Image (cartoon, helix red, strand yellow):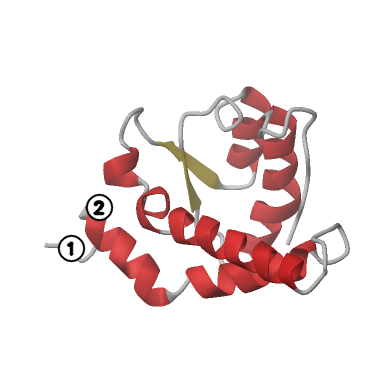
Amino acid sequence: YSIAVSPNGWTDQELSFEWMKKVFVPEVNKKCQNNLPRLLIVDGHNSHTHFKFLEYAHKNNVIVLCLPPHTTHKLQPCDVGVFGPLSSAWKKEVQKSFSIGHSVDRYNLIEVYSRARRDSFKETTIQKAFKTTGIWPFN
């Protein structure tokens, strides 16, 4: 995991650039040893479309595909069917921690989040999200 924060709690250009540099490129390079281009699909948020981000992507053989606006319901399956269950699972895990007298802090945040993610990022949930948007199965 990689955790970063911004002053207002939202992603910004610097956070996205650091993620590209420290997380995305190293991870895809570990998994893809060949020199083929990598594809990164993003929304149109300015944190994904600024020059420094796109230039770094280009230099590292990453093609950035920006989705058209107002297409979440068709092109972003995780928004459609995965992040909702993740949010519910997170709330459940936080409630569980509080009910046994534990708080969620910087020391156990990853552990609590990992349980919520494990409960919600199931293969069947992800496949259903892709099916709901019509992206999968191909027909």
Residue at 18% across, 63% down = 138
Quadrant hosting residue 71? top left
- Where residue 40 appears, as percent x and y from the top left, is 50, 47
- Where residue 139 appears, as percent x and y from the top left, is 11, 62
Q: Is residue 127 above or below residue 105?
A: below
CA separation, marks 2 and 1?
Answer: 11 Å
Nearest the camera: 47 or 131?
Answer: 131
Q: Amino acid at mark 2?
A: Thr
- Where residue 101 appears, as percent x and y from the top left, is 82, 70
Q: Element type at marker 1?
A: loop
The reply, left or right, for residue 86 in relation to residue 93 is left
The reply, left or right, for residue 72 in relation to residue 82 is left
Residue at 49% across, 69% down = 121
- For label 1, the crowd category at 10 Å Cα-Cα, with few meaning under 14, some 14 to 19 and many 20 or more, is few
The reply, left or right, for residue 72 in relation to residue 22 is left
Q: Is residue 20 above or below residue 29?
A: above
Nearest the camera: 42 or 107?
Answer: 107
Farthest right residue in view: 107
Nearest the camera: 62 or 49?
Answer: 49
Residue at mark 1 = 138
Depth-wise, is mark 2 or mark 1 nearer the camera? 2
Nearest the camera: 67 or 125?
Answer: 125
Residue at mark 2 = 133
The reply, left or right, for residue 128 in relation to residue 10 is left
Q: Amino acid at mark 1?
A: Phe
- Where residue 84 appears, as percent x and y from the top left, is 45, 54
Q: How many marks?
A: 2
Q: Which quarter of the rendering shows the N terminus?
A: bottom right
- For label 2, the crowd category at 10 Å Cα-Cα, with few meaning under 14, some 14 to 19 and many 20 or more, is some
Q: Element type at marker 2?
A: helix
- Is residue 115 visible in the rendered image? The answer is yes
Q: Earlier in the sequence, mark 2 or mark 1?
A: 2
